[in-house]
Image (cartoon, rainbow, N blue to C red):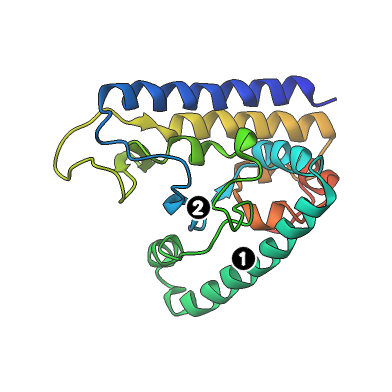
């Protein structure tokens, strides 16, 4: 039922891979991504419903032991996220500070094994595919660029960036299509981003129908 939407999502992931490779080829000494480099795997980030459904679908087709180990790590990560959010309640009247504070948390991705390898690497989120090169997001009309701290890209130097906000726009559209196809009673949730540690533990049906809390 969702094959067409998943195919569209895969095209977005391939687009991200192509953009990463293009910048990497232009600045090979600045891109420090390599085997077992997992700096970006210690962070709090979310995925849109279409991406959550895709990842959850493929995660549940891994071997049982692998899933069990990941779910144990996901439970720990979720507890750490909730603890961080509780600590950041002092910034309830400053939402930007809360987002900034949560973004600074070093919480290990549950998909990362003790051998520093991703158990779902081929199906990993789009943010994981472009993190090693400059990317940009929008806050209102202002565009802000970001880059991995472990990279060799220099401050105050202009580089080409992956327009991540454009990819996110497409993921919102696909999430909206997903909810329409499943007859979701919560179409407004198409723009929400869910923590990876949470979506791994959710039933697939809950994700595709938007039956989850914000």
The answer to whether 105 is drawn above or below residue 184 in the figure is: below
Classify 10 Å Cα crowding around label 1: few (below 14), some (14-19), many (20 and above). Answer: many
The quarter holding residue 69 reads: bottom right
Q: Is residue 165 left or right of residue 196?
A: left
- Dot 2 or dot 1: first in sequence order is 2
What x and y, as percent, mark residue 54?
A: 71, 36
Classify 10 Å Cα crowding around label 2: few (below 14), some (14-19), many (20 and above). Answer: many
In depth, the one of 55 and 46 nearer the eye is: 55
Q: Which residue is mark 2?
A: 41
Q: CA distance from mark 2 to mark 1?
A: 12 Å
Which quadrant does the N terminus fall into? Answer: top right
The answer to whether 156 is drawn above or below residue 19 in the figure is: below
Which quadrant does the C terminus fall into? Answer: bottom right
The quarter holding residue 122 reads: top right
Identified at 69% across, 57% down, the residue is 198
Q: Is residue 115 left or right of residue 20?
A: right
Identified at 84% across, 35% down, the residue is 183
The quarter holding residue 182 reads: top right
Number of numbered markers:
2
Q: Residue furthest left?
A: 156
The answer to whether 42 is drawn above or below residue 146 in the figure is: below
What x and y, as percent, mark residue 80?
A: 58, 72
Identified at 65% across, 41% down, the residue is 120
What x and y, as percent, mark residue 128?
A: 50, 41
Q: Which residue is mark 1?
A: 77
In depth, the one of 13 and 145 nearer the eye is: 13
Q: Secondary structure at mark 1?
A: helix
What x and y, as percent, mark residue 166?
A: 45, 29
């Amino acid at each position: 039922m969702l094959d067409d939407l998943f195919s569209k999502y895969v095209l977005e992931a391939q687009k991200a891979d192509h953009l990463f490779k293009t910048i990497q080829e232009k600045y090979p000494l600045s891109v420090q991504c390599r085997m077992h480099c997992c700096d970006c795997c210690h962070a709090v980030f979310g995925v849109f419903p279409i991406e959550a459904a895709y990842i959850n679908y493929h995660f549940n087709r891994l071997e049982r032991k692998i899933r069990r180990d990941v779910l144990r790590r996901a439970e720990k990560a979720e507890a750490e996220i909730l603890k961080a959010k509780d600590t950041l309640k002092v910034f309830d009247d400053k939402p930007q500070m809360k987002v900034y504070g949560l973004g600074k948390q070093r919480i290990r991705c549950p998909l990362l094994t003790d051998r520093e390898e991703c158990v779902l690497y081929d199906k990993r989120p789009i943010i994981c595919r472009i993190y090693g090169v400059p990317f940009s997001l929008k806050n209102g009309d202002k565009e802000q660029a970001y880059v991995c701290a472990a990279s060799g890209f220099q401050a105050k130097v202009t580089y080409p960036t992956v327009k991540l906000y454009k990819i996110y726009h497409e993921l919102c559209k696909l999430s909206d299509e997903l909810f329409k196809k499943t007859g979701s009673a919560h179409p407004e949730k198409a723009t929400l981003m869910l923590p990876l540690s949470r979506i791994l533990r959710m039933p697939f049906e809950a994700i595709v129908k938007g039956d989850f809390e914000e």
